[in-house]
Amino acid sequence: MDKNKALIEIKNLKKYFPIKKGLLKKTVANVKAVDDVSFTINKGETLGLVGESGCGKTTTGRTIIKLYQPTSGQIIYGGKDIAKLSEKEMAPYRRKMQMIFQDPYASLDARMTVGDIIGEAIDIHKLMTGKERTERIQYLLDRVGLNSEHANRYPHEFSGGQRQRIGIARALAVQPEFIVCDEPISALDVSIQAQVINMLEDLQNDMGLTYLFVAHDLSMVKHISNRIGVMYLGKMVELCESNELYKKPLHPYTQALLSAIPVPDPEQAAARQRIVLEGEIPSPIDPPPGCRFKGRCRYAKPICSQQEPVFKDLGGGHFVACHLY
Amino acid sequence: MEITKDLFERVPKDERDLNKIVRPSLTYWQDAWRRLKMNKLAMGGLFFVIFITLVAIFGPMLSKYNYYSQDFAIQNQGPSGTHWFGTDNFGRDIFVRILYGARISLTVGYVASILNLTIGVLYGGIAGYFGGWVDNVMMRIIDILYSIPTMIYVILLMTVMGAGLKSIIIALAISYWVGMARIVRAQVLALKQQEFVLAARTLGASNTRILLRHLIPNSMGPIIVTLTLSIPSAIFTESFLSFIGLGVSAPMASWGTLTSEALQVYLIYPYQLFFPAGAICLTLFAFQLLGDGLRDALDPKMRK
Amino acid sequence: MEKLLEIKNLETSFYTHAGEVKAVRGVSFHLDKGEALGIVGESGSGKSITMMSLMRLLSDNGKIKKGELIFDGRDLAKLSEEEMQNIRGNEIGMIFQDPMTSLNPVLTIGDQLTEPLIKHRKMTKQQAFERAVKMMTLVGIPSPESRMKQYPHEFSGGMRQRVMIAMSLVCEPKLIIADEPTTALDVTIQAQILELMKDLKEKINASIILITHDLGVVADVCNRINVMYGGMIVETGSTKDIFYNPKHPYTWGLLKSIPNPNEEERERLIPIDGQPPDLIKPPVGCPFAPRCEYAMKICMTENLPVFEVGENHKAACWLNHQDAPKVEPPVGRRNL
């Protein structure tokens, strides 16, 4: 597969959530959840998106899939800008782009049987009916490693890992090309996480899927992703090939993030020097100009509060937004 | 215990079912019913509600008396084997009149509640789901409706349509759905950000589908509780309106008119007041118990 | 070493409509003074319920069926509710997963910090205030005097967890129990809190029980680790034993399912197949046997044995029996 052919191009994507006050609901401020982010996702690759809560990674994923209407910018899917399409015009794209959610408890409708949850997409797009539909549901259940007689059971009867598989089967029902995985393993136990990750890898190999893998767990993201983008406060601060990011993190935030990962090895954990970041992520409501990381950065210079660093390619597809480079 | 070598033989993995579910299947409604059954008071309420409903439907058919035939030979008789609850000032059988009264009271209760269910659920659902200015406008309309007392609707409707059952039902329907709409809106607002709704949207589900297949079914618990608790208040309002003379007209009898008539003679014939008042109290009490029991049984926070 | 806590053969069950859920099934372990013990396990392994039993904070349908909870010479299982209230917060401090829900939103941080001091230690308001400020300084909250007057919502997530830690420390408890203290936090904040806990261990020689599902967290903070599965302790040993010389297949499985951060090419992860047992009907014999790669006939029939596999290192697995086939552990010292 040609991994260098772009499937999705994100250009200057912005998503602001207005804060409204008063009787007339006047906008008093904006939460700049995603603020001018550009990147491409190549066909057949897994692009990891990491960052801490409030950095806009989930919003980015949801905006790309048009769960949120972007404030501005382009989302070019297979050559066509879908950013401004209406819900009706989106219909064909809804079959190509799917999503796997974070919370295996909240992401399945508790009042529907597993069969109906998986079959919902088939019904919506009127793909098949009757026996054909039943067989398809059984096939999908089987594909994600569940028994086909589970179709008549309800979500609450399953464990977290099994529910996450149901969520994957639902996403696969429309035979998508692209799946946004929104923290699909963060709510699962360690021994189950690996099951789900392996399944996602198998499905990618068999069906040629492209993933946008959103997570805060850097070690899993590193494992599954070809390239990783690091977000901070609505901005993409670094983007490169995943091994490169691990070995040669350039942005001070990426360095701190990497050093904060707990290492499951007592000697290594004792030996290494952590970069402990002071303070916390500032509010994304109308953030101040300049680099958004400057308040917590060890290397902050005067220029960092005056000018916003440009997100530029330092060669070999290693992008970084920092005045140090 | 003896440990022999053959006990250490490997057992291959595929002999073991790794995705087995050991607990029996239990749907939301089965689980709620199980919990309701454990609540003795609520079950008592439920049985009484079923009992009074059946009696209201079939009782008058089985009785040899009716609510309107007057017989001045048996005026104001006390309870006896022939007239269980005695007779009134016109020699009419009070038991049968209470049964007919139950028909009217329960009809008002059920019809008004079903109307308020349909209007309230749709209205609240739409306001909550679409949010923004749609919600804003729809909720202001509700505020206005809510600020007009039920009594004014009734009196206005009476002047237009004449006194009677129909006016009461319509008046109650107009004023009662507002509460239901508010409950449903709050539910939908809380549910619509849930991931399963987002999932339906990524699958391309239409707004109607999301509302009818996901949001409303997931709000059914509070809807049913509100519905159950709105029936007794409708019955009470009807009784009250009839009591003050704004309800059904003679010789038809509702529990309210029966109480009102009995009040004039209650010092001489207290049983005439006792029975219809008792019927109102017991029915309201039964619905309240049932509603409280349902609330406990359907509350998702209680579910584990 | 002096034993601060010894739990002997604890059994705790929850009684639900579907039957008895045997959440803890015969757990025994001890904690020395000044030690940091990690309890690692997945959801439903019984790790939190063990600690809730110790604190006697089980929900109404939960019951300690058996066992002794000897803390500082007393059996907590036999104390009255009033005596327990004097132990909670005073002699045993607790840190919970979610700092938002464990702080009272309508009281100031200062009120919440000083209340136990006034109640348990009979301090005056002024004394309590000074002590609280000292604790806030210790856990690294800047300008503690002014922050004492603020409400929980005015604190960020990481700061709230610091307040929780200050609260658990304020009465100088003999033991601190931290139940997933960093799970709800971001990685960089988690790093701050872990550094703080390591600091406390050194500065005030705190005895800590750290409950977590994250092996990375215990590797950093704890001296000793209990691995729990299906309501039982399946392996216990020093942190190095558990990471470098594990003797139970479940511990192997846990270590294997973590991706190797140094991999160049994508190496396939080795998950543990299947699901954790439903403790309403726990499997006979070893709880892990249905998912175990090395399961033998004996594992499905006999009660779980405990084998001493080293100094203070025990594993509940038949593979350590002399007659069992020799198995090369698939993990252990990684090439790092």
Image (spheres, coloured by chain):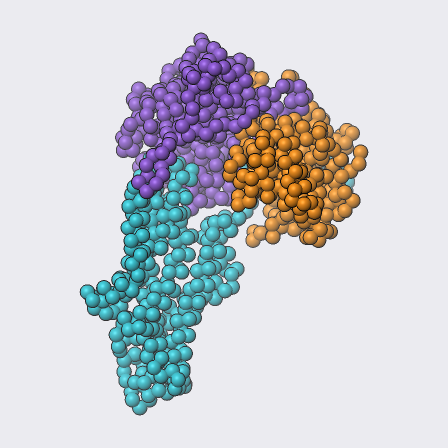
Chain colours: A purple, B cyan, C orange
Which is more toward the observer, B139 or B208?
A: B139
The spot of residue A150 in percent (x, y) is 47, 41
Residue C320, visible in the rendered structure = no
Instruction: Check the image and report above or below for B195 versus A63.
Output: below
Q: In which quarter of the image is residue C270?
A: top right
Q: Which residue is drawn at 40% across and 28% down?
A: A286
Which is more toward the observer, A249 or A100?
A: A249
In the displayed structure image, the side of residue B14 where residue B184 appears, left or right: left
Which is more toward the observer, A186 or C233?
A: A186
User: How many marks do you count on the picture?
Assistant: 0
Q: Residue at x 58, y 17 (%)?
A: C262
Instruction: Check the image and report above or below for A206 versus B214.
Output: above
Q: In which quarter of the image is the N terminus of chain C?
A: top right
Q: Which residue is drawn at 46% across and 36% down?
A: A166
Q: Quadrant of residue B207?
A: top left
Q: In which quarter of the image is the C terminus of chain C?
A: top right
In the displayed structure image, the side of residue C281 where residue B77 appears, left or right: left
Residue farthest to the left? B160
The spot of residue A118 in percent (x, y) is 40, 38
In the displayed structure image, the side of residue B280 where residue A92 appears, left or right: left
Instruction: Check the image and report above or below for A264 versus B176.
Output: above
Residue farthest to the front? C126
The spot of residue A301 in percent (x, y) is 49, 15
Q: In which quarter of the image is residue A137?
A: top left
Residue farthest to the right? C1
Q: Which residue is drawn at 56% across and 32% down?
A: C158
The spot of residue A7 in percent (x, y) is 36, 20
Residue farthest to the top? A315
